[in-house]
Amino acid sequence: MTAIATRMIPAKALDEDFRRLGESESSVQLAMQELADWCIRNQHLIEQGRKHGFRLGTTPMVKDIIALACSTPGEAARLTANIQDVPQ
């Protein structure tokens, strides 16, 4: 299996709450970005799960991070449409 590098999303593109995490919580930032990459790589799994009643849920902030990590706006819309909103 080929390793896929986590895409680092520019801080200025992220939600203000996410930017407030600071350098001391960089592991949280990295984990959220790794989750975004996992969602992109497993988009088919997320779509199929939704068809069968299984849904992945995230807060709006995490959904935004996932959308920012996508290659195109179309990919972002398709992926985030299959993710359930969970209140913060």
Image (cartoon, helix red, strand yellow):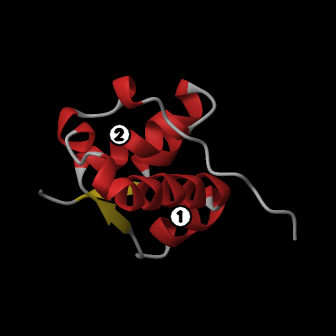
Residue at x-position 33% and y-position 33%: 14
Disc 2 designates what residue?
A: 64
Nearer-N-terminus badge (2/1): 1
Q: Quadrant of residue 18?
A: top left
Residue at x-position 30% and y-position 59%: 58
Disc 1 designates what residue?
A: 46
Residue at x-position 50% and y-position 47%: 79
Q: Position of residue 3 (x, y in %)?
A: 80, 62
Measured in 3D between alpha carbons, the distance from the residue under mark 2 to the one under mark 1, in whole angstroms, is 16 Å
Q: Which mark is residue 38?
A: none
The kind of residue on which mark 1 rests is: Ile
As displayed, is residue 88 above or below residue 7? below
The kind of residue on which mark 2 rests is: Asp
Q: Which residue ends up furthest to the left in the rendered image? A: 88
Q: Position of residue 9 (x, y in %)?
A: 49, 35
Name the quarter where the C terminus is drawn: bottom left
Residue at x-position 63% and y-position 32%: 71
Between 85 and 14, the one nearer to me in the picture: 14
